[in-house]
Amino acid sequence: MHPAFLAPGSVAAVPIWFVNASSWRDVRAGLDRNACAFAEASGFEPVAGRHAFLPGPDGTLAGILFGQEDDGRPRDPFLAGKLAGTLPRGVYRFANAPHDERLAALGFALGGYRFARYGKSRTELRLEPPASVDLQDLSRIVEAVYLARDLINTPANDMGPEELAAAAMALAARHGAEVHTIVGEELLAQNFPLIHAVGRAAGRAPRLINVSWGDPAAPKVTLVGKGVCFDSGGLDIKHDAAMQLMKKDMGGGASVLALAHMIMDRKLNLRLRALIPTVENAISGAAFRPLDIYRSRKGLCVEVGNTDAEGRLILADALALADEETPELLIDLGTLTGAARVALGPDLPPFYTDNDTLAADLARHGRAENDPLWRLPLWRPYEQMLDSKVADLNNIATGGFAGSIICALFLNRFVTATKAWLHFDIYAWTPAAKSGRPEGGECQAARALYALLSERYG
């Protein structure tokens, strides 16, 4: 069980009352008279997100009042996560039911996350979850999200390709999975030329992480995550502001590991394969150059229109490998384009698929899990923008439009045998703290995908 939770009845927990305009009278009637007087004297109003501490007769904390949305109003299912930044250390419980007990408990636990590797301590908040909640499942989800956030938040000096591979190995060992890595020049020997080209300039060798788990006879589901541990932009170097957050450019790989943990811990009935091509896009005399041409694992010759569009290059080789096995479902996640952020902002990752049923199921789970996603089209007429005069295709468009769609179309060229494919263009970062989502690295799309896979292979 994750430390954010405590088994019911273990210790005396401080009650949290959820109130709005319609329930405030009933809640107030059940409070101790002195506590009620204190709430009124402090000016508490049952407004969403507002809270009040209620003192006990001995001066200790006797309870919390927390405002939630009025009935019929748009709701933030993670609103209880706001409490994590205001409550003192201790154990808490829900004294009455919020709008959605499961998501409120999840938001509370996720809101309590703190990146603690370099001296800052985690907030010692613990929740006695409601009886209606599957504590084991909730715990594995929180653990997965914390794992992804920790990996993304770790700076590149301590999170290079080797360290990301070590995290995958530790996860594989925990669940009895097999893991293999292909490192450095061996990438060329085993026909992963695009991964090698992008990573060869760095002092830390590029590699491909390959995790396998589950019954080989079960339906095959393959996850592919972009693992660029730092992206300078290569010779098409980024300016300083654009480079500031590039430690998060391995957020796709981190989210894949988070999803893999949920799948393996739940023991879903599927054959899992997780592929993470991981590199540092650095600058040296060995750096790949604009207008270089490489023959990919798929056999397609790719012209490099821009070295800062490197994520799709390493994903292309990994997707080609995955496609050779013709999985039932192939999913890739990567922090790929600024165009996706311009279109949908940091909180709403776009996804792409030609499978309408799969898209509808995923959107439904995204809403149910408060893991927002939005489908964008694989608009085939734009494929001509990837044309090259000297190669099979370019890695960027000839114009500056539809950047996220163009990236999806590029990757789709490397998926030809798979039955169903999902592509996610995530941001993997929360720029300003929100309920349940502290500022910093964020695990996007994994919870919705876990719900989808649990429904299909549970």
Image (cartoon, rainbow, N blue to C red):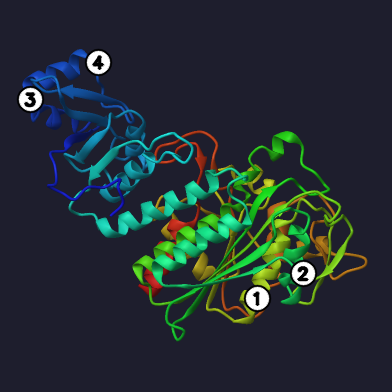
For mark 4, does the 10 Å Cα neighbourhood hold few (<14), some (14 to 19), or many (20 or more) residues? few
Q: CA distance from mark 4 to mark 3?
A: 17 Å
Three-letter amino acid code at the position of disc 4: Gly
Label 1: which secondary element: helix
Q: CA distance from mark 4 to mark 1?
A: 62 Å
Three-letter amino acid code at the position of disc 3: Asp
Q: Residue at x 48, y 52 (%)?
A: 148
Q: Residue furthest bottom?
A: 217
For mark 2, does the 10 Å Cα neighbourhood hold few (<14), some (14 to 19), or many (20 or more) residues? many
Q: Which residue is mark 4?
A: 43
Numbered badge on residue 321: 1
- Whether label 4 touches label 1, CB < 8 Å: no
- Whether label 3 touches label 2, CB < 8 Å: no
Q: CA distance from mark 1 to mark 2?
A: 12 Å
| Discs 1/3, front | 1
**Residue 208: percent from left, percent from top:** 64, 67
